[in-house]
Amino acid sequence: MIITRERLNLDELLQESPSLRRFLNNAEWINITYQRSRREAIVETGLLEDDLAIAFPFSVDEILDLDFYPNPDE
């Protein structure tokens, strides 16, 4: 699954370059990155803008947790 693969890649990057972790504590960087990713997902999948949250909906702990998957029913 893509999410798991990317989380593993992120974990490896953070282990190789711990200084990158500071970006995860930067709300502005998180927002900019999310907006770019949101736009990319809309273009690549054909989802409507209303299908994806406008603001980043997850905590840093959630995005780093290999076992976390959002519940689409919530």
Image: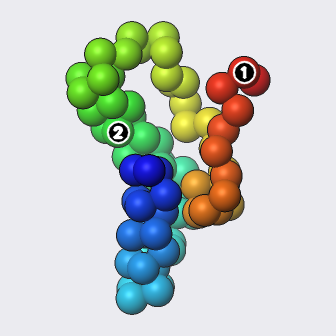
Is 6 positioned to the left or the right of 55 in the image?
A: left
Q: Name the residue carrying label 2.
A: 37
**What mark, if any, has residue 52 been given in the picture?**
none
Q: Name the residue carrying label 1.
A: 73
Q: Residue at position x 39%, y 88% from top?
A: 16
Residue 38, quarter of the rendered image: top left
Counting from the top left corner in percent of width and height, residue 54 is at: 51, 24
Three-letter residue code for mark 1: Asp
The foreground one among 15 and 26 is 15
Q: Residue at position x 70%, y 32% from top?
A: 71
Discs 1/2, front: 1
Instruction: Name the element at disc 2.
Output: helix
Neighbours of disc 1 within 10 Å: few (<14), some (14-19), many (20+): few
Counting from the top left corner in percent of width and height, residue 29 is at: 43, 52
Please, is residue 40 above or below residue 4 in the view? above
Label located before the other in sequence (1 or 2): 2
Is 27 positioned to the left or the right of 40 in the image?
A: right
